[in-house]
Amino acid sequence: MTRNPNLPIAGAGPVLVAVMTEDPLLRAGLQSLLAQAGDEEVDVVEINDAEVALWDAGVDGARALTRLREIASLDVPVVAAIGEASQLGPALAAGARGVVLRDQVGPGIASALAAVRSGLTVIDTTLAPALVPSHPKAAEAGKRKGGIGELTERERQVVALLAEGLSNKLIADRLGISDHTAKFHVNGVMAKLGASTRTEAVVEAVRRGLVHL
């Protein structure tokens, strides 16, 4: 679990969560689980009033990722409940700020939702091996693949502005978006390009022909 140090911890108060699933039984179970959350107070609300969305990938995870992109575009941080580890990368690439396994969702989900509201990125510990290869050769192979997904049109705009040396604030001003959204897109660009720094992201974008200096 990591946190952008520039993001403030959210204030006190219940976490306003939208539960988004096509499975009525799962919806009822999640709502009951959230209502009984221990240290974290959670209110289940509609998406327009939510601070965080708890989104279920369902049994057809690939088809569902299209809907995840639509939800993430609403500028509401999303915790995705996926069916298998192979969906971790695609879920992050589609905009999820947290990822958990749907068949292992338990009382800790309330804390995960509160953490995401505060600006953290949350990954189920059982999914960590799928994100960070443990074997050096596997890690090198992942680096050659260059990240975990293709850039969206907005991310292409962001990486072009990174190549101009713009800060997150200037990127936000240029694109007419919030500073928070700009940071989110920059982090997404770096993840997809397999870069640990903004400079590495620009170099990789140039190598791929996404940016011409």
Image (cartoon, rainbow, N blue to C red):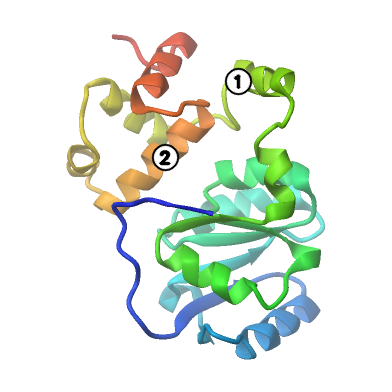
Residue 211: which disc? none
Q: Residue at 60% across / 20% down in the picture? A: 143
Q: How many marks?
A: 2
Q: Position of residue 211 (x, y in %)?
A: 36, 15
Q: Residue at 46% across / 39% down in the picture? A: 188
> Could you tell which of marks 1 and 2 lies nearer the N-terminus?
1
- Taking 73 as reference, is 55 left or right? right
Q: Vertically, is 181 above or below 114?
A: above
Q: Residue at 26% across / 27% down in the picture? A: 161
- Taking 201 as reference, is 54 left or right? right
Q: Residue at 69% across / 84% down in the picture? A: 33
* Element type at mark 1: helix
Can you say which quadrant of the picture contains the C terminus? top left
- Taking 59 as reference, is 64 left or right? left
Q: Residue 154 is drawn in which quadrant? A: top left
Look at label 2 and name its amino acid.
Asn
Can residue 44 be seen here? The reply is no
Residue that label 2 marks: 187
Specify few, some or many for label 2: CA neighbours under 10 Å numbering under 14, 14-19, or 20 or more: some
Q: Vertically, is 119 above or below 183?
A: below
Residue that label 1 marks: 143
Q: Residue 81 is drawn in which quadrant? A: bottom right
Q: Residue 32 is drawn in which quadrant? A: bottom right
Q: Position of residue 133 (x, y in %)?
A: 70, 31
